[in-house]
Structures are given as structure tokens and as C-alpha cells.
Image (tube, rainbow, N blue to C red):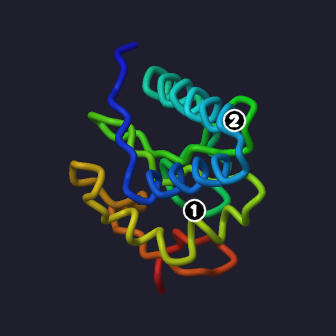
Amino acid sequence: MKSKPVVPRSLAEQDIDEALNHYISEEAEQAALGFVDALEQAYAHISRHPGTGSPRYAHELNLPGLRSWQLTRYPHIVFYVERPDHIDVWRVLHGMRDIPEWLCADTTFELANDNTAGRPSSSPTSAEGQPYRPTTTSRGCGSKSQ
């Protein structure tokens, strides 16, 4: 299978910077370097095998196409969507955070329409081809507005 380029969005890059700053502030430089290695390994894997990520949060939050991949030996999860020509990395979040809240709060619509990954991304759509509008309901953050 041909690899696709992995393109992290600005929020994912901020998440990575925050994790690195945390490790460095704790004087854990080796942990910071290990985190970078684990992230590079995760990116290499999802680049070659994007369909192997878990769709758990896609179902839980009603965000079609969202997948996640846990870093090896680190508590961080890469959230991404496979696009026709690249892997669109939305966030890299610590697994102990309230993941649905972090993905829904004020980022889902922004992420779906964000062009900061270097290329325009298509917005998630329903089976009928209608765009999803984020709402915070019991059905998840990708529920269609009524």
C-alpha cells in the first residue's frame, strides 16, 4: 500500500508542543525524545495503514471518518481523518483528558473547516451529503442540527 503524507493541523501541533513542554518542564528530556519517536512511529503507521485506527470516537461523537491511534508507551492518542491524498491529523490528546469534550467543545466545526493543514479539507457529511453541524447533544458533537 502506498503511504499518504501525514499533515497535522495547527491544533495538533499545539497539542504536541504542550506535551513536549510538559516533559521538558519535568526535566524529563529522555521522555520528550521518546514521545517524539513514538509520535513519528504512529505517523508512519497511519500513513501506511490509515484504516487500522480505532473508529470508537467516530461512533461515540457521530463524526464520520474520525479514527484514533494510541502512541506506544505514551498516554497520547492521535486523532485523524483519512483524506484522498493525505492523513489529516486533528488532535494529539492525552488519554486521561475528557476526549469527547476536547474534540467537541469549540473545535469540531473549526476542525472540519480548517485549512491550516496546508490543504483544504472537506467537511464531514451525512449519508445524504448534508454537512454536519456540531451540537452538543446526547447523540454526540457531530449530530445534525434540527
Instruction: Give the amino acid type for the residue marked by disc 1 in the picture.
Output: Asn
**Residue at left 56%, top 71%?**
104
- The reply, left or right, for residue 58 in relation to residue 17 is right
- The reply, left or right, for residue 7 in relation to residue 143 is left
Q: Residues within 10 Å of mark 2 (few under 14, many from 20)?
A: some
Tell me where residue 97 appears, x and y as whole percent. 73, 62
**Residue at left 29%, top 36%?**
84
2 or 1: tag closer to the N-terminus:
2
In the drawing, what numbered circle is on residue 62? Answer: 1
Task: Identify the image quadrant of residue 10.
Answer: bottom left
Taking 85 as reference, is 59 above or below it? below
SS for dot 2: helix
On the question of residue 57 being in view, the answer is: no
Whole-Å distance between the Cαs marked 2 and 1? 34 Å
**Residue at left 66%, top 53%?**
25
* Quarter containing the N terminus: top left
Task: Identify the image quadrant of residue 71.
Answer: top right
SS for dot 1: loop
Residue with the mark numbered 2: 31
Taking 128 as reference, is 1 above or below it? above
In the drawing, what numbered circle is on residue 42? Answer: none
Instruction: Give the amino acid type for the residue marked by disc 2 in the picture.
Output: Ala
**Residue at left 71%, top 45%?**
27
Which residue appears farthest toward the front when viewing the image? 27
Which residue appears farthest toward the left when viewing the image? 119
Q: Residues within 10 Å of mark 1 (few under 14, many from 20)?
A: many
Taking 14 as reference, is 74 above or below it? above
Which residue appears farthest toward the top when viewing the image? 1
